[in-house]
Every structure is written in C-alpha cells, then in structure tokens.
Image: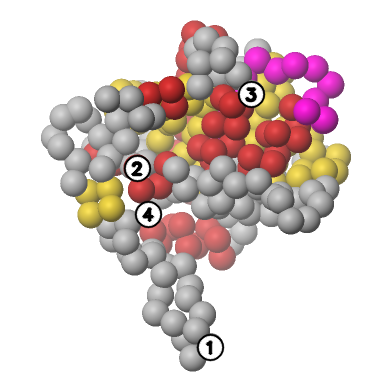
Amino acid sequence: MKLLVTNDDGINSPFLHELVYALKGAGHELYVVAPLTEQSWTGASKTRHRLVQSTKADQGFGVPTWTVDGTPSDCVNIAIAHLLPTKVDAVVSGINVGFNCSLGFIIASGTVSAALEGALHGLPAMACSQDVTEETYYKLKENEGKPEGELLETLKISAAHAARMAGELLPKTPHRSFIVHNLNFPIPCTPTTEVKRTVPAHFFVPGLFSPPDDDGRHKLIWIDGEDVSPPEPLADIKCIESGFISHTTLDYRKLGHP
C-alpha cells in the first residue's frame, strides 16, 4: 500500500522511526509528514492564528519526508492537499510514547486525531501507541525519547506487529467509512503477544493541572484517574494491563446514535 505516516511526538521520535522501518520492511510505499516538534495532547486542533510552514526533511528513511511546524492534524491535512505526489491508500499514525486508551485520552490524543484526519479525508486509518511506565515516560522525555534495552526490543516488536496489522486491517477497511483502528501495545510486547478486540475504557481524568503558583500559572501534571469500566466488553486499559495488544475500532459514524 501507499501510506502516509505521521505522529504527534515529532519527526525526531525514535518511536516514529521504528514504525517507518517496520512499514518499509513490510513492502509498503511510504510518505512521512510529521510535526517539527512534539504536539502531544493537541487532539484534532488546527493551527488557525499563524502561518504553518512545511519543509522537506532527511531523516535517513529513504522515503519522501517533510516536517510541518503545526499539529498532527495540520500534518495530514497539508500532506494530502499539498505535499504528496500521489494519492495514498491509508494513514498510519504513531508509534506514540505512552498508551492512548480510554475515553479520557483518545479524544485528546494527537496520535489518534492524526489518524482521524485521514478518516475525515475518506481514508482508512490506524493509530499506534506503546504503553510505558510513568517513570520510563519521563526518562524518555529527558533523554530525547531514546529507548534502550528491553523497551527498545519491545518497540521494535510492536512496530513489527503494527506493520503486520496495517497490511491486514487497512485493506479491509472501506474508504469513506470514518473508521480508525486504535492499537495499543503492552510492555513488554513479544512476537507471540495476542491481539484482543476492545472498547475504550470508561476513565475519568479530573484535576490534570497543578494549583496556581504565585503568578497564577498552572502546570499539566499526571495523576491517577478513575476507571469505571464494566467488566464486559473488554476495555483497552484492562487489555494492555493483562499483557495483550488492544485493538479498538473507532467508528465515528456512531457518535450520537442510540
């Protein structure tokens, strides 16, 4: 397939790089258009109040690559309208640093929203995220996102799963269907890790900002939320906590339907 690959952690993220290598190794024709800098938690936002610049880039992928100094949704929209020399068959977003599970995080996710932007263009789309511990997450951010050891091995395996599932899921997804396949990989992930079909967990996430400092400024922080998911059907958070790959089909046509 011809695939547009993007993410929300930015063009320099090794998690994106491993996905590109795996998809390329699986024989897909790739075009990479990713944010110039990290754009996590930007959701489906578009850059409205300033000009957005796209620039050709060389990340050593051996495929046409651009950066966009905007949001993940900007990347996909600008790529399809102005950068790609041909029509693509689907959009693949990720691999995100950290999971994108539950109602509390899916809507806020730049990774998922980049895939949704593809779906809004009538394309099959897939979002991929790698679960990590909170400690590992902050170490990655401090170390410019460079995974090592067991995490790097897991990431390569997760990327291989993503490439395989792209070949299985995307050709079967109708165009103009508003469907996004949301994949979340557990830690660790092995070549034999089983895939489970899931639904988004019912997860409340109040109080994400710190109290004001002396200047009235609030900082985004991480706190434990409240999972109120019923035991069935299997929820995405429970799935990856149990060591399985979570596959949630997000059908945006069903929003608002009884």
Residue placed under numbered mark 1 in the picture: 215
In the image, what residue type sits under mark 2? Leu
Q: Nearer the viewer, mark 2 or mark 4?
A: 2
Hey, which residue is sitting farthest bottom in the picture?
214
Q: Residues within 10 Å of mark 3 (few under 14, many from 20)?
A: many
Residue placed under numbered mark 3 in the picture: 121
The part of the chain drawn in magenta is 81-95
Residue placed under numbered mark 4 in the picture: 133
Does the residue at mark 4 contact the one at mark 3 (Cβ under 8 Å)? no
State whether residue 200 appears in this view: yes
Residue at x-position 33% and y-position 42%: 102
Locate residue 92: give its quadrant.
Answer: top right
Q: Residues within 10 Å of mark 4 (few under 14, many from 20)?
A: few
The secondary structure type at the circle numbered 3 is loop
Q: Residue 7 location, x and y as percent?
A: 61, 40
Lower sequence index among marks 4 and 3: 3
Q: Depth check: 88 or 144 in front?
A: 88
Residue placed under numbered mark 2 in the picture: 103
Locate residue 238: give its quadrant.
Answer: top left
In the image, what residue type sits under mark 4? Thr
